[in-house]
Amino acid sequence: MFRDLAATGRSRTALFLSRAVGALAMVLPIVLVTAIATAAGSIALRVDLAAPDAGTLIAGTALVLAAGALSTAVAVGVSAVVGSRGPVIGILLAFFLGISPLLEVIGVLGDSRQLVPDVAIHRIGDLSTPAGMHVALGIAIAVVLGWIAVSLAAGAWRTKTREI
């Protein structure tokens, strides 16, 4: 299908960006509905516990939306660079579940740990960050947007230069 669309003269960058927008349009509503259902459940099923306040609910929703947008954009970008979606699943699972949490706690990296996506997402969701680290919310948002931009730029570049 990509070959046919590219042969019509349509911009390859536009084709790639439509793929990225389509992926985000599929993932973010599902993540938002899940966050709303979780918030409603945490209020309705609390029994003896205090209900979460609005700030906690908003922070949790922001956390899952940021994580969903980040992982979707990185997946779309990396799959365009690699050229196959199968290995990308393994690469991203290894990075997001194994490597990123390790980078988060390696103290010798110092303040450069603020560039790790997990640290930024934890800050967006008002969760604890590694000991001794204070990450400004603006920096956390910039880090997430930076990861998204770099991933999509790499995918757009590869889509533009690949042979069909």
Image (cartoon, rainbow, N blue to C red):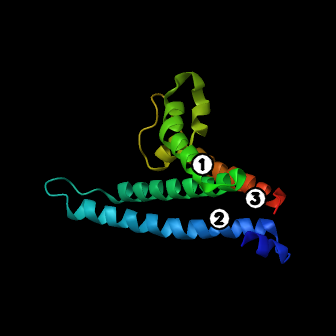
Residue 133 in view of the camera: no
As shown in the figure, which amino acid type bears the numbered disc 2? Ala
Q: Are marks 2 and 1 in contact (CB under 8 Å)?
A: no
| Disc with the residue nearer the chain's start (3 vs 2) | 2
**Local crowd at mark 3 within 10 Å, few (<14), some, or many (≥20)?**
many
Inter-mark Cα distance, 1 to 3: 19 Å
Estimate the x, y position of residue 116 in percent, counting from the top left: 57, 39
Name the secondary structure under disc 2.
helix
Residue hosting label 2: 20
Residue hosting label 3: 156
| Disc with the residue nearer the chain's start (2 vs 1) | 2
As shown in the figure, which amino acid type bears the numbered disc 3? Ala
Estimate the x, y position of residue 22 in percent, counting from the top left: 61, 70
As shown in the figure, which amino acid type bears the numbered disc 1? Pro
Residue hosting label 1: 87
Q: Quadrant of the N terminus?
A: bottom right
